[in-house]
Image: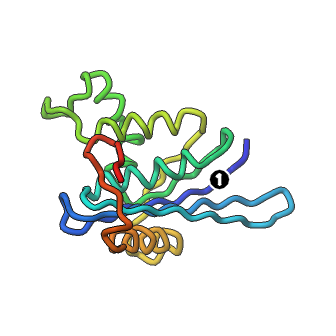
Amino acid sequence: MTRVTAYTDGAARGNPDGPGGYGAVLIYVDSKGSVHEREFSGGYKQTTNNRMELMGAIIALESLKKPCMVDLHSDSSYVIKAFNEGWLENWQRNGWKNSKKEPVKNKALWFRLLEAAKPHRINWIWVKGHAGDEYNERCDALATSAADAPEADLLSDDGEGDLRV
């Protein structure tokens, strides 16, 4: 399996329900030792930080053309703990209810992330945000730039994982 390193981040202004964006960087070293990087970003008129954190991971994984071993780095405890601490298994077992017996937020995006993750072997790695990590800082810049883009260039986020122009 091909090994890929992914960094992802999300940002929202006026969280919740302000403009937001996500950023992702994929890094791959080919058999000749050449490093390849690819960046992704997108913005939304109204969204939340957690939704953008999810979108960063989703876009990174959906962009992979074949099954890979992925080291996915994120500064989002929300995303990383969901996988590493069993939150997702508990939510599924409890009918997509959280520990307070309330419906899990962002369910459609969690479904999309789970689907995007299926073909891959993923190590979910938490990285401290705004602590000088080169790729985390780059993702943050991509996400905030997308959040701050002119309104006409932003998509609307319907709150259920669908995008509208």
Q: Nearer the viewer, residue 50 or 147?
A: 147
Find disc 1 in the rendering and name its residue.
4
- Estimate the x, y position of residue 32 in percent, counting from the top left: 86, 62
Q: Nearer the viewer, residue 22 or 91?
A: 22
Q: Is residue 26 above or below residue 109?
A: below
Can you name the residue that lies furthest to the bottom here?
132
Q: Position of residue 76 (x, y in %)?
A: 36, 56
Residue at horizontal 31 percent and vertical 63 percent from the top = 20
With respect to residue 34, does 102 lie above or below?
A: above
Q: How is the image coloured?
A: rainbow
Q: Residue at x 36, y 53 (%)?
A: 165
Front position in the image: 107 or 42: 42
Would residue 144 appear left or right of 119 to someone viewing this image? left
**Residue 120 placement: quadrant:** top right
Q: Amino acid at mark 1?
A: Val
Quadrant holding the N terminus: top right
Looking at the rendered structure, the secondary structure element under dot 1 is strand
Number of labels in the image equals 1
For label 1, count other residues whose C-alpha is less than 10 Å away and answer few (under 14), some (14-19) or many (20+): some
Asked whether, in this view, residue 22 is left or right of residue 4, the answer is left
> Could you say where residue 30 lies in the image, as x and y percent from the top left?
79, 58
Tell me what residue is drawn at x 53 percent, y 52 percent. Answer: 60
What is the residue that sits farthest to the right in this orientation?
Answer: 32
Residue drawn where x is 56% and y is 57% of the image: 6
Measured from the top left, where is residue 150 in percent x and y?
34, 74
